Amino acid sequence: MADPNFLPVARPDLRKSQQPLGVVAVFAASNFPLAFSVAGGDSASALAAGCPVIVKAHPSHPNTSQIVYEAVIKGLASQGLPKELFAIIQGENPEITHWLARAPEVSAIGFTGSAMVGKLLIRLSQERSVPIPVYAEMGSLNPVFFTPTALSEKADELAKAAIDSALLGSGQFCTKPGIIIVPNDNNGDKFISQVKEYVAQQKVAPLLNKGIATRFKDAIVKLSKSKGLEIISGTDNSDGFGVTANIFVTDWSEVKNHEDLLEEHFGPTSVIIRTPFDEYLKVAKSMQGQLTAAIHAGADENVKDLVDQLSQIAGRVIWNGFPTAVSVTAAQNHGGQWPASSTHTTSVGLDALYRFVRPVVYQNFPDNKLPQELQNANPYGIERVINSERSKKAIN
């Protein structure tokens, strides 16, 4: 509020509102036909921000996409909103991606998928005469660190839980633990022994489409030819786009010879890395940005430095748990440092909608010229911050 007596100069009346960016192009993910597709987090947060949405449906599930689109249109109609707020584009032509990213009517992009396509969208957006923001979630290794104390207490249980997390959905979660770090001692050996026994019993479901299955098989063949790697394989599955679970085991000293181990491989695989416990911090510092990072440790263990480092590279740090599930709550953050995400935002939770708005301040406006949400009477009855205090009351 204005304060004519404020020193050293009078303070003007300042009222700030968040305004929609405009049309948002959303590129649906292949692996979540609901949560990260037509009506997923990007679409929901863009609509909540007041932006019209154009969704490029993923060709892996066109019928599901159409059903969900029609449900959204019915939902808009039930609230008296025009169907033009939400549109869908179906097709396999890769040029559709280029057209949408370059369309002058599009003001922002939401994307969940591969680093290759995410980086393409970023490049296309920057080549426009007026660049636009791209909010891309592009995958992650999601490292999980096990301390000697954690494994000494329940190595068998943790080994099974880690593999269950890595193979959930046939390893097609962007939050899959792709790197598992264990100590090179008896505790680590016990963990790996249990992994061998457990993985041998696992038969994973077919992958989502032919392209994913082909890329996964090619990656496994390439990794299998590398020296210094032990391979633990599950039960073969040759049905449809079926593949076999493969877990690789190696030492940290070997990783520098196999940089492709530190790349995300979409499918039922993970890499177990053995290294001395006192090298854990060094390992963490060598890693790029991640969506998540987890640590399993004893209640009295001093792992503060490791946790601090993990918080520098990951958007969600997990204590004595696994990263695969993503709870949709106001407190959630689903995003991380580059290259896991294109920028420091989240695609899940209330903060996701702030990607698609921009702040605008109105200075010294008469009340009847202000947007309704900023007027003294507060006709919407929303909570506002007035002179640093939260209130739903009108301004007298």
Image: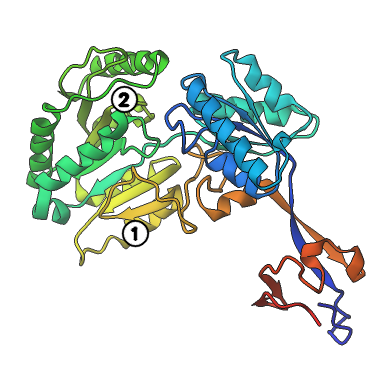
Circle 2 SS class: loop
Q: Is residue 281 visible?
A: no
Circle 1 SS class: helix
Quadrant, the N terminus? bottom right
Within 10 Å of the Cα at label 2, are there few (<14), some (14-19), or many (20+) other Cα atoms?
some
Amino acid under label 1? Answer: Asp
Within 10 Å of the Cα at label 1, are there few (<14), some (14-19), or many (20+) other Cα atoms?
few
- Which quadrant of the figure has residue 360? bottom right
Mark 2 lies on residue: 258
The residue nearer to you, when weighing 184 against 298, is 298
| Residue drawn at x 47%, y 51% as measured from the top left | 333
* Left or right side of 104 for 175: left
Q: CA distance from mark 1 to mark 2?
A: 27 Å
| Residue drawn at x 11%, y 31% as measured from the top left | 196
Place of residue 37 in the rendered image (x, y in percent of width and height, measured from the top left): 51, 33
Mark 1 lies on residue: 305
| Residue drawn at x 71%, y 31% as measured from the top left | 126
Of the image marks 1 and 2, the number of the one nearer the N terminus: 2
Task: Tell me if residue 272 comes above or below residue 156 in the rendering.
Answer: above
